[in-house]
Amino acid sequence: MSYLLGKRSRKELEGVHPDLVRVVERAIEITQQDFSVHDGLRTIAEQRRYVEKGVSKTMDSKHLQQKDHYGHAVDLVPYINGKLRWEWDAIYPIARAVRKAATELGVKIRWGGCWRNITGTTLGLKFLRDEYAERRRKQGRRPSLDGPHFEIILK
């Protein structure tokens, strides 16, 4: 089955780094799980509201305009039966599609499910998520799992 980005998703991609947009556009073509671009470029006011609500932890978000004038992050949320759903079983196929698209296009992508570069790796996504969570626990820190979050690595 092939999916397409809707008008709202396309609107959310405005102002996002072109290489990340290319990855998202390719990912929707090859994914086995439909998704919506829930968030792309955010204003400072939007980010502040997210932090106040506890939805985001930082004002130093890659969703904000960076020095190159682009947002460097997107949130890709599974779209199931006409609703956005934050469910890991549906997030993994999206992350696989993003990883494949990024690898094909030569774009490095950090995934919020493990907070590391997933481009080019063949390690299982659940393994990467669990490894990250365990590492944080051993450090006495709570893991910050954000499966729908993908950001471009430009360095």
Image (cartoon, helix red, strand yellow):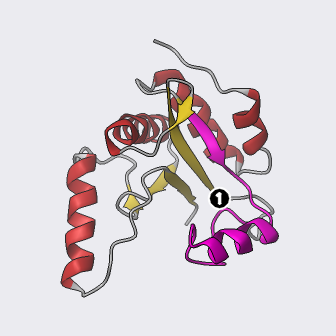
Q: In this rendering, would 84 be left or right of 49?
A: left
Q: Position of residue 100 (x, y in %)?
A: 41, 35
59 and 46: which is toward the camera: 46
Residue in the picture at 54% in, 43% down: 76
For the residue marked with disc 1, what is the amino acid?
A: His
Residue in the picture at 37% in, 57% down: 113
Q: Position of residue 9 (x, y in %)?
A: 69, 36
Residue in the picture at 51% in, 14% down: 2
Quarter of the image with the N terminus in it: top left
Q: Position of residue 111 (x, y in %)?
A: 43, 55
Q: What secondary structure is marked by label 1?
A: loop
**Quadrant in the picture for residue 67:** bottom right
Quarter of the image with the C terminus in it: bottom right
Q: In this rendering, would 111 be left or right of 121?
A: right
Q: Position of residue 127 (x, y in %)?
A: 20, 53
Q: In this rendering, would 88 be left or right of 52?
A: left
Specify start and end residues of the magenta stretch as a single range. 36-64
Q: Which residue is mark 1?
A: 72
In the current view of this chain or complex, which residue is farthest to the bottom? 140
**Quadrant in the picture for residue 93:** top left
